[in-house]
Image (cartoon, grey):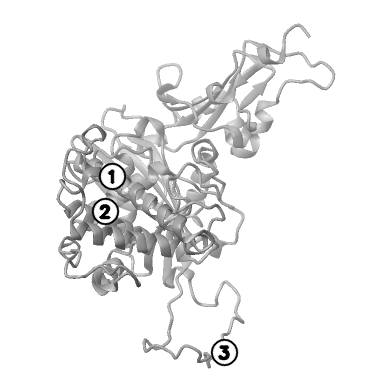
Amino acid sequence: MADTNEDWSSNSNEAVEISLVVPGAGAPKALHTFNPKFTYPIFGDEETIFGYKGLKVNLRYNASDMRPSLQITWNSKFKTVGETEPLDVKAVLEPYLPKTALEKTSIFNAAITDPMYKDWKPPGELWKTIQSGDQTFEVWKGSLADLAIQQMVKRIQILVPLFIEGGTFIELQDPEWSLERWTVFFLYEKKKGFSEAVSPYLFMGYSTVYRYFYYQSTASSRQRPKNQLISNEAKFDFKLPLNNISFNSLPCRSRISQFIILPPFQHGGNGSRFYNAIFDFYLGEHQTMEITVEDPNEAFDDLRDINDLSRLRTMPEFLALKVNDSVKIQRKGPVPRDILDLEKLEAIRRKIKIAPRQFYRVVEMQLLSLIPQGVRQSLLPEHEKGKGPEPQTHVYRLWKLWVKKRLYKHNKDMMLQIDKSERTEKLDQAVSGVEDDYARLLRQSELRKGPGRRVSATSETNGGSSNGNGKRSSSDDEVEDEEPAAKKAKIST
């Protein structure tokens, strides 16, 4: 072998390029070109491709309907020696792409110049139009049971492993009644500068939302004696789908599963616009009782926290929330239940449809913002910490006690396994970390000038089981669905 393996290896994150193109004079014109964030789900943990020099794997998309075209080029290719051979890049990518992506380049170039594109519109129905300055954004939505929506998802689903840590494909071979539980949202900018022969729609990102049945107890609100057995026998002798009953007509928890804003459109408030548009839809939908997120990463956590806080701050009853400063702190015994008005909190939460754990985090953030800045030293930039008075006010101590109670309850199983002295220390550290994080988010929130603007987040959420690099070690839904807690001895905030 004339060269070492290293000489013939290419970094797959750099070799793969994704482009959004429109018809141009003689050849398609690239509007945006970018690299994937991850390629290990496709090319392995090392994210390398062996057997080429000057390798380029170009995945071009028609900017409107996202029709794909795969081009693979190289300067030189390794000659097979024994069992050592170049990776068949096309064969590796084939399961992730529709067959049209593997057609000749000339077929793709001709297809996107078809005059029909002049009047092309996204699949599904228009849900919301958003005007921002001289830019017009549109959010379209449709059921995954719709064949046009399915075709679009087949074209773009490769973006999931390329941009979502641990993201997985949706099974499109499920029966229709199951596919109907999925709703797909598309974010487009409607451009004004494109030629008349080209569709004005520029694809920016998409999101999938899944409906889970939301169980509501029909038992009497009167508290049952502690040891009294339930007299009614539970009956589970039914099979899905239910005859003459659509799942979409039942009360549900709508969970955002996948959420992608393409790199050229990140850091411009587009993630917030998209998230708020999706939230608006389910807030107004009668069947949805709660809006949740599946395994969000750190960037999406930030986006969600800031936008949920902004939304709640439009509600007078939320703004009126205060810590009950008449509560006395006892040296021993349980944490007082009346630090906050639980009935008011629950009424607000149900009205806004935010999941419990997420809601109470945002409530804590809001209450922290009401504590004078001289007390809230963590709200000052890092170099200014320590200049103000010590945080010893009664309201501040009550706030910390409330947060500590929530953290203990959320991590109870793990906390009971450690010594009491270490338990107290870990809770104090966790409360301090929570306060610092809230302070950072509140500073970001203050930079906002209006809905959907200036949110510094890359707008992604994991679609698989991995926790990614999220600052919360378990998702909201793990608590809400009563799934097993994480086994690691780490306090989840």
Q: Earlier in the sequence, mark 2 or mark 1?
A: 2
Question: Do residues under tags 3 and 2 come within 8 Å of each other at their CB atoms?
Answer: no
Point 82% across, 15% down: residue: 81
Where on the picture, by quarter, is residue 459?
A: top left
269 to 227, vertically: above or below: above
Q: Which residue is mark 1?
A: 441
| Distance between the alpha carbons at the discs numbered 3 and 1 | 48 Å
Comparing 74 with 7, the one in front is 7
| Distance between the alpha carbons at the discs numbered 2 and 1 | 8 Å
Disc 1 is placed on an element classified as helix
Mark number for residue 365?
2
Q: Earlier in the sequence, mark 3 or mark 1?
A: 3
Comparing 168 with 472, the one in front is 472
Q: Which image quarter holds the N terminus?
A: top right
Where on the picture, by quarter, is residue 271?
A: top left
Foreground label between 3 and 2: 2
Residue 329 appears in the picture as rendered: yes
Q: Earlier in the sequence, mark 3 or mark 2?
A: 3
**With 311 as the anchor, is 417 left or right in this view?**
right
| Distance between the alpha carbons at the discs numbered 3 and 2 | 43 Å
Question: Do residues under tags 2 and 1 come within 8 Å of each other at their CB atoms?
Answer: yes
Q: Which residue is mark 3?
A: 233
224 to 285, vertically: above or below: below
* Residue 254, horizontal then vertical, whole percent: 42, 61
- Which residue ends up furthest to the right in the rendered image? 82
Point 25% across, 43% down: residue: 378
**With 269 as the anchor, is 409 left or right in this view?**
right
Please state which amino acid type lies under the numbered disc 1. Answer: Leu
Disc 3 is placed on an element classified as loop
* Residue 406, horizontal then vertical, whole percent: 37, 62
Point 62% across, 34% down: residue: 42
